[in-house]
Image: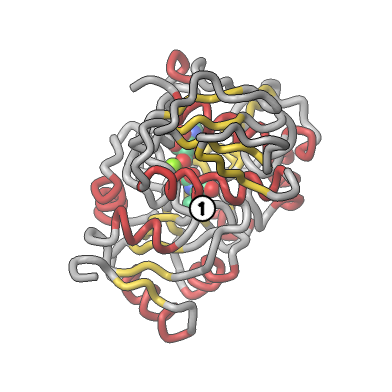
């Protein structure tokens, strides 16, 4: 694959290769338990600028900072009692906390905001890299801005492989959707800025969930949570959970949660899970959308998930993917 960077097998030599590249200010593709990240030194302004450029991301859309532990995170952000308690319960894991930033975090990371989105990822490969470094890693999802997030190393290679020196292979991402983002800036009004693998029920908070569509009017509160996002090139139409696609032509693909009881002859039917399990639906969502996007279908008709647990995150991503440009 000339012009594309190598996918590195997850062994110590290759981990050290990534560490060396990161120390030299390069950005590399790294696996997390949610999606693949485009990682670089969060404390180095030039490297962070490179992350935005490689991704084609506007500078108004801030990045998540990844640390190896709550102790390291505490050097770069201020944790209230509630923030500390949540971090202890859910880290390492798929929960990102928005908390006041410290001076060590350059303004470019947070798009000039006084708060930073920060998390300790659970993936052993990402953890191992962080532990070898003495700086945190800024890492947005490793997809071109606006496109579907990568859940396998090959997805990163296909879209950004000509712009980065390396991708570390960590297999298929366990969750398959991005982390839950919890805004803790106002203790009286804790808000889920982005639903994810950890649901509001699990958080045990009466947190308000920001609705896709409302976020654009609230740009300062939820920067970057653009209504239209996660979009494949093929147009998306959604249909109700348990329902049937409306006016799907023979040239379209229909993506169900699980194998439908009866498949209408002539329809190109696919499904995300044999069992209908929400975790499995989320795990396979972006991979199947990317696969169907490279086939020649004229549209993707996709069934919404049951609106609970990680199904809330699946529906959030689907609604954004289907939003008009
Ligand atoms: O699972 C994940 O969170 C993945 C992996 C790589 O960790 N990362 C990820 O990053 O999804 P990204 O850049 O694709 O999405 C981060 C979102 C931004 O779009 C922005 O809305 C929000 O996090 N965000 C970042 N910093 C923020 C801040 N200071 N205040 C409010 N929201 C912030
Ligand atoms: Mg993203």
Would residue 176 be found to the left or right of residue 93 on screen? left
The image quadrant of residue 209 is top right
The image's colour scheme reads: secondary structure
Left or right: 5, with 109 as reference point: left
> Residue 79: image x %, image y %?
63, 43
Residue 286: give x, y in percent of width and height: 50, 46
Image quadrant containing the N terminus: bottom left
Which one is nearer the viewer's eye here, 188 or 249? 249
Judged left or right of residue 99, residue 292 is left
Which residue occupies 39% across, 76% down? 8
Q: Residue pushed farthest bottom?
A: 13
Q: Is residue 206 left or right of residue 76?
A: right
Q: Is residue 221 above or below residue 39?
A: above
Q: Residue furthest front?
A: 265
Q: Which residue does the image show at 51% across and 35% down from the upper left?
A: 266
From where the camera sits, is residue 187 visible? no
The residue labelled by disc 1 is 35
Residue 297 percent coordinates (x, y): 38, 38
Q: Image quadrant for the C terminus?
A: top left
The relative height of residue 23 versus residue 164 in the rendered view (above or below) is below
Q: Quadrant of residue 153?
A: bottom left
Disc 1 within 8 angstroms of ligand 1 (CB): yes
Secondary-structure class at tag 1: loop
Q: Which residue sits at x=44%, y=78%?
A: 9
Q: Quadrant of ligand 2?
A: top left
Q: Position of residue 275 (x, y in %)?
A: 75, 48
Residue 243 can be seen in this image? yes
Mark 1 Cα shell of 10 Å, populated few (<14), some (14-19), many (≥20): many
Using the image as rendered, state which of residue 271 and residue 14 is in the foreground. Answer: 271
Vertical placement of residue 222 versus 170, above or below: above
């Amino acid at each position: 694959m000339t012009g594309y960077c190598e996918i590195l097998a997850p062994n110590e030599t290759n981990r050290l290769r990534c560490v060396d590249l990161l120390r030299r200010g390069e950005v590399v593709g790294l696996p997390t338990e949610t999606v693949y990240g485009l990682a670089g030194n969060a404390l180095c302004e030039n490297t962070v600028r490179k992350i935005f450029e490689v991704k084609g991301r506007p500078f108004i859309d801030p990045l998540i900072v990844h640390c190896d532990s709550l102790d390291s995170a505490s050097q770069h952000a201020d944790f209230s009692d509630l923030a500390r308690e949540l971090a202890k319960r859910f880290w390492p894991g798929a929960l990102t906390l928005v908390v006041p930033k410290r001076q060590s975090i350059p303004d470019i990371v947070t798009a000039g905001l006084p708060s930073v989105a920060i998390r300790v990822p659970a993936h052993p490969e990402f953890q191992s890299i962080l532990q070898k470094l003495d700086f945190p890693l800024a890492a947005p999802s490793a997809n071109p801005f606006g496109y579907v997030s990568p859940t396998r190393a090959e997805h990163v290679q296909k879209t950004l492989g000509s712009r980065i020196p390396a991708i570390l292979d960590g297999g298929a991402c366990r969750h398959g959707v991005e982390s839950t983002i919890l805004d803790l800036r106002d203790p009286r009004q804790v808000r889920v800025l982005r639903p994810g693998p950890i649901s509001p029920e699990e958080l045990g908070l009466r947190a308000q969930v920001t609705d896709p569509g409302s976020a654009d009017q609230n740009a300062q509160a939820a920067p970057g949570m653009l209504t239209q996002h996660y979009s494949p090139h093929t147009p998306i139409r959604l249909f109700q959970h348990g329902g049937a696609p409306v006016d799907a032509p023979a040239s379209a693909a229909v993506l169900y949660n699980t194998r439908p009881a009866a498949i209408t002859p002539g329809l190109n039917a696919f499904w995300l899970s044999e069992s209908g399990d929400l975790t499995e639906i989320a795990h396979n969502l972006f991979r199947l959308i990317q696969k169907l996007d490279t086939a020649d279908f004229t549209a993707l008709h996709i069934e919404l998930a049951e609106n609970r647990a990680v199904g809330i995150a699946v529906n959030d991503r689907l609604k954004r993917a289907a939003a008009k440009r």
